[in-house]
Amino acid sequence: MASLASPSLLSSLTKSRTGRVSLAVLSSSRCASRGFRRGAKCNAGSIVPNRRVFLGIGALFIDQVVTMASGSGGVGRSFVASARPRQGVSPVEQILKNVDWPEQFPFKDEDFSRFDESPDSIFYSEPRFVTHIDDPAIRALTDYYSKVFPPSNSPGVAMLDLCSSWVSHFPAGYKQERVVGMGMNEEELKRNPILTEYIVQDLNVNPKLPFEDNSFDVITNVVSVDYLTKPIEVFKEMQRVLKPSGLAIMSFSNRLFFTKAVSIWTSTGDVDHAWIVGSYFHYAGGFEPPAAVDISPNPGRSDPMYIVYSRKQLSA
């Protein structure tokens, strides 16, 4: 694992569409990185805090982090999947199998710092009526939803789309009596045809969800889990508002607003990301063991797409 002792420099990992990693050295005095997506702006007045920086190399990286956190010194204990990687099987789908989780959450506060720490309300103040993953990835996500969602128009079913916008990528014609969107831009939420109601709320300022316990059958989050600076608090709230056995689906790609994603995400790779999201479920408590699915439609030729999901425990 690489870290920086000097506050005068930041090393960050920038990732290509194919998932390859390259090293870039940035000044820590100002925000110096550009977002991956068009429309991401660098706030020149934003002071960048000190950040731990990691070299994301899959299971080896995760072992390094959690071994250090556990104080085991790296002797005789692996915290990641015990099975050897199988040919033809995505490593993302294997990383959450047979995990021996550390006793304590292995990440520090600085791992959730960002290059641009200006208020998110400013960054998201202008609506962006664009999609943040390409069409094949969108189709793959919609197809996945069609397989795991409750049937359309099921009596009493309620859905919550966290970090929502003008589109949720639900199957065409899908409807439920209650579909709530929570996001940062009201104009985007107003345009979302799937929503029956919406709430504007910044989860990085207030992670408390304004709903009663056991309110929702399904919670979705599309390519936004990487922006959460208080993920354990948010996942605890997700667990609280889900009905027993309710399903939480976190989907992500390698496309993001780089300056607004948390340090632990921008410094690591796709396999690491699945483990990180799985850790949010585990340490929030009250969820079944999380699992990962690689639904990437055209590996290396279009945006990758991954799912980490879990259900609220019946006894929680």
Image (cartoon, helix red, strand yellow):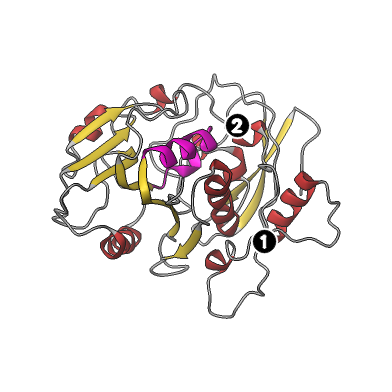
Amino acid type at mark 1: Val
Kindly tell me whether residue 184 is visible in this rendering: yes
Q: Position of residue 35 (x, y in %)?
A: 48, 39
Q: Which mark is residue 113?
A: 2
Q: Which mark is residue 215?
A: none
Q: Which mark is residue 80?
A: 1
Q: Is residue 156 left or right of residue 306?
A: left
Task: Examine the rendered structure and indicate whether residue 186 appears above or below residue 105.
Answer: above
Kindly tell me whether residue 132 is visible in this rendering: no
Measure the alpha-carbon separation of dots 1 and 2: 25 Å
Amino acid type at mark 2: Ser
Q: Which residues are magenta?
A: 222-241
User: Residue at coordinates 45% horizontally, 31% vertically from top-left?
Assistant: 41
User: Residue at coordinates 47% horizontally, 28% vertically from top-left?
Assistant: 204
Q: Position of residue 83 (x, y in %)?
A: 65, 73
Task: Examine the rendered structure and indicate whether residue 118 appears above or below residue 281.
Answer: above
Q: Position of residue 137 (x, y in %)?
A: 35, 60
The crowd level at tag 2 (other Cα within 10 Å; few <14, some 14-19, many 20+) is many
Q: Secondary structure at mark 1?
A: loop
Q: For the view shown, which residue lies furthest in the front direction?
A: 315
Mark sitting earlier along the chain (1/2): 1
Question: Is residue 288 or residue 27 the one in the foreground?
Answer: 288
The answer to if 77 sits in the magenta stretch is: no
Question: Is residue 32 or residue 118 the one in the foreground?
Answer: 118
